[in-house]
Amino acid sequence: MTTIFQDKEQFIDEYRLVVKAFTGKSFEEAGATDRYQALARLIAGHARDIASESFTESSRKHKKRVYYFSIEFLIGRLLDNYLLNFGIRDLVAEALADMGADLDELCELEPDPALGNGGLGRLAACFLDSMAHEGIAGYGNGMRYRYGLFKQEIVNGRQHEVADEWLSGGYPWEVRRQDRAVRIGFGGHVVTREKNGRQVYSVEGASEVLAVPYDIPVVGFGGKTVNKLRVWSAEPAEEHFDLETFNHGDYARADADRANAEAISAILYPNDQGEHGRLLRLKQEYLFVAAGISSLLRTYREEYGSDWAHLSDRVAIHTNDTHPAMCGPELMRVLLDEEGLEWDEAWEIVTKTVSFTNHTILPEALERWPIDTFSRLLPRIYQIIEEINRRWAESFDTAAEGWQEHFRNTAILWDGEVRMANLSVICSHSINGVAKLHTEILESTVLRDFYALTPKKFNNKTNGISPRRFLAEANPGYASLISSAIGTGWLDDASELERLLPFKQDAAFLEKVGATKLENKARLARYVKRETGLVIDPASIFDVQVKRFHAYKRQLLNVFKVIDLYQRLTTDPNTTIEPTTFIFSGKAASSYTFAKEVIRLINSVADVVNKDPRVNELIKVCFIPNFRVSNAQLIYPAAEISEQISTAGKEASGTSNMKLMMNGALTLGTLDGANIEIVDLAGRENEGIFGLTKPEVQELKDKGNYLAWDLLNDDPERLGRVVGSLTDGTFSKLSGGFESIRNEVMINNDPDLVLLDFHSYVDAFEKLNHDWANRTLWNRRALHNTAMSGWFSSDRTIREYRDEIWGA
Ligand code: 26Y
C-alpha cells in the first residue's frame, strides 16, 4: 500500500493549503463545494505525482502499454473510490470530522460523469480500475463530451430528457494538456504524387479541428499504479473570430467555426445499440481514434524512435466494440503516408497490434455507414478501407465452393455501406465475445464465416466488475462484515471471497448478513423518499431490475408479473405473497418509443398499485429516476432478487447480474449471457432460473409457428386479463392507455416472447418470494452467491486479456 499521508495532521496541513490556494479562503470560510473541489484537487495532485513516478518506472522496465479505445467511459464518482484505493478513507473521514466537516457530504457534491450509455461504458471503467490494480500500463482513450447522457426526469409517468451539464461547476480531476493537442482533418480530397518511384498520398483541402486531451488519473487499488484516462475535446483549429461580422451584429456567425468544431464533442449519442448513421457521430469516432493513435505513436517515438516493426511488442490497441474500428485504417494511414512504410509491412504491424471485443448481437446495433457519407468525410481512410477490402476479396480461393457467400458475409464494403464489424475483425489479431454463450453465438452465427477461416483468432472473455467499487465502496457494511470473517485479502484477490463458504453454517453470521442487507434497504428507502416522495418498506423484499430499457431485456415481462399479482391479490383471496417492493430504474434512448412506453407503463402501474389500500401492505412499485453509477451504488446493495430476464440469446453478457450477485442478491433469470456462468458457479438451487433456453428459442424461430394469440386464448384468466388491462383504462389515469404495447405483443406477435415465458417466470418468482420467508436459508443462499462471485472480478477478466490477447 502506498501511503500519501503519514497521518491526519499531515493531511490537514496539506488540505488547508490547497483550500487556501484554490479558493482564496480559509477552510472555515470555504463552502461545501469549495471544500469538495479542493479535496479532489489534493488527491488528484498526489495521484499525478505517483503517475509520473510509475511512468518513468514502467518505461524503464519497457512495459508494454495497453491502449483501451472506447467511445464511452462511465467512470462514476472518483473521490470516495480513490480514497479507498489509496487506503486513506478512514484517515480522511476522521480528519474531516475533526475539522467539523463530513466526508460523505463532500463526496455527494461530485458530479457523476455520464460519459456512456450503459454496460459497455461501465465495463470500460471497471477495466481501467483493474488494469491499474494489476499493474498494467493501461490507458483509456475516449471522448470528453460536454453533455453526458441526458438526465432523466419523470413527469406524469413519462421520461423527459434534460441536458446533463456535468462540467458547469468545474471538474477537479482533469488536467487539460494543450501541449498534446492534435490537428484532425475532415473532408478534402486525396492527392497522389510520385516520390522516388513510389506513390505518396495526402489529403488537400480538408478542414481541420483541434483535438485537445484532458487527462484523468486512474488510481489502482493499493495506490502503487496510477494510469490515466485521456479524453478528447474538439475545438477550432484556428481562432477564427470574425470581428467584422461581429461588428455588423451577426454574433452567431462570427463564432461559427468555434461552434462547428465544438459540436463534435458536444454530446454523447444516447442510443444504446440502435439507430446510427449520423455524420456527427462519425466525426466523433474518427476524432478520438485519430487523436489517440497520434498520441500513442508520439509516446512510442519518444522512447523507441521510428522502430515501427516492433510496435506490437510495445503497444496493444484494444477496440471496445466497433466504435473505434477506424484504429486499423488510421494506423495504416500514418504508417504509409507519414512514415513511408510499404503496405505489407504496415499491415503486419497493424494486425499484430489491434484487437477487438464485440458486445452485441442485435442486428440493429451492428454499425454501418453509407459509403458516400463516409468517403466524403474521410476520403483517405475510405481509400485505405477499399484497399483492405480489395485484398480481402483477393485472399479467397475462387475455386473453392461457396466462396462468394463467405465473401459476401465478410466484406467490409457491401450494398453501399461500410460494415464496421467486418472492418474490426479483419484488422484484428483477436476477436472476443463477453460471455461463453455470447462467444459461441458469434462463432456460430454473426461472425461464423470469419470463425471458419480463422478459428484461432476467436476467444471468450467473460465480463467482470470491480469488487472495490461495487462491493467495498457501495456496500461498506457488508464489506466490513466480510473482512471481519476472512480478512481484507479479497479486495486484492476476489477469489478469496470463497473463504466465506464455511460461514454458511454460522447462524450468528447469517443473521448479520441479513442485518446489513436491512440497513442497505433502509438507506435506499431514504434515497427514494428524498428523490420521489415514495415511501417503501425496508422490511419487504426488494426485487430489482436496473439497466437500460430495451425490448429484449423485457422490463415488460416484469411489469406483466406485477400486474398479474395485483389482479390476483385483488380478486383471489388465496393468493399469498411476502411483502415485496418492485424496483425499476434505467433510461431509454430518446428516440426509442416502445422503451419509453414501458417506462410510462411501470409508472402508471405504480400510480395505481401504490394508492390501492387493498394491496398496499403487500406490493409497491418504485421507479427510481435517472439511473447512473452513483445511485446504482445505493441500489445493488439493497437488492434481494436480481432480475436478469432477457430473451435467451439476446443479452451478450450483462454486468448488473454480477454486481447484484456480489452484493448477495439471488438471480431470477433466464439462461442467457453471463447468467449461465452464475448458475455454473453458484448452483441452480441458489438462483431462480426459468424460461426458454437459447436452443429452444432457436427451434421456435426455425419452426416459425409461435402465435401469441394462442397463448392468450389458452389463458384468458391471467394472461388475457393482464393484456386487457393495457387498454381497458385500468392504468390510463396518469397519462393515457397502452395501445402500442398491446399491439407490439398481440399484432406484432410478441417478438421478445414475453407471453411465452410469462408463466414459468411468475412461478419462479413466487418460488423465490416464498423462500424468503425462511430468512436463515435465504441469507445462506445470499452469502453463497457472494462467496462464489469472486470469479466475476474484472481483475480476473483483465488478467485473461493480458495473458491471452495483449501479451502485456
Ligand atoms: C453503434 C451504436 C448504436 C451503439 C451504441 C452503444 C452500439 C452498442 C452500444 C452499447 C452496447 C452495450 O452496452 N452492450 C452491452 O455491453 C455489456 C458489456 O459487455 C454487456 O454486458 C451487455 O450484455 C451488452 O448489452
Image: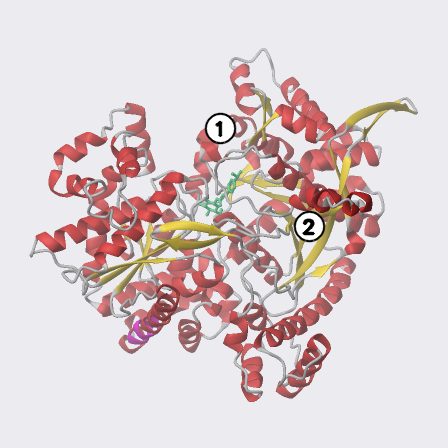
Amino acid of disc 1: Arg
Q: Which residue is mark 1?
A: 448
Q: Check disc 1: other Cα within 10 Å, few if <14, some if 14-19, many if 20+.
A: some
Q: Residue at x 56, y 35 (%)?
A: 456
Q: Is residue 429 visible?
A: no
Looking at the image, which is closer to me, 628 or 486? 628
Inspect the magenta stretch and tell me whether residue 399 lies in it: no
Vertical comparison of 41 with 134: above or below: below
Q: CA distance from mark 2 to mark 1?
A: 38 Å
Amino acid of disc 2: Ser
Q: Is residue 171 visible?
A: yes
Identify the main secondary structure in magenta.
Answer: helix
Determine the secondary structure under disc 2.
strand
The stretch of residues the image draws in magenta is 511-517
Position of residue 501 in the picture relative to residue 139 (left or right): left
Inspect the magenta stretch and tell me whether residue 514 lies in it: yes
Looking at the image, which is closer to me, 371 or 788? 371
Where, by quadrant of the figure, is residue 633 drawn? bottom left
Mark 2 vs 1, N-terminal side: 2
Q: Residue furthest right?
A: 196
Q: Residue furthest top?
A: 399
Image x and y of residue 103, in percent: 53, 78
Q: Which residue is mark 2?
A: 233
Position of residue 740 in the picture relative to residue 724 (left or right): right
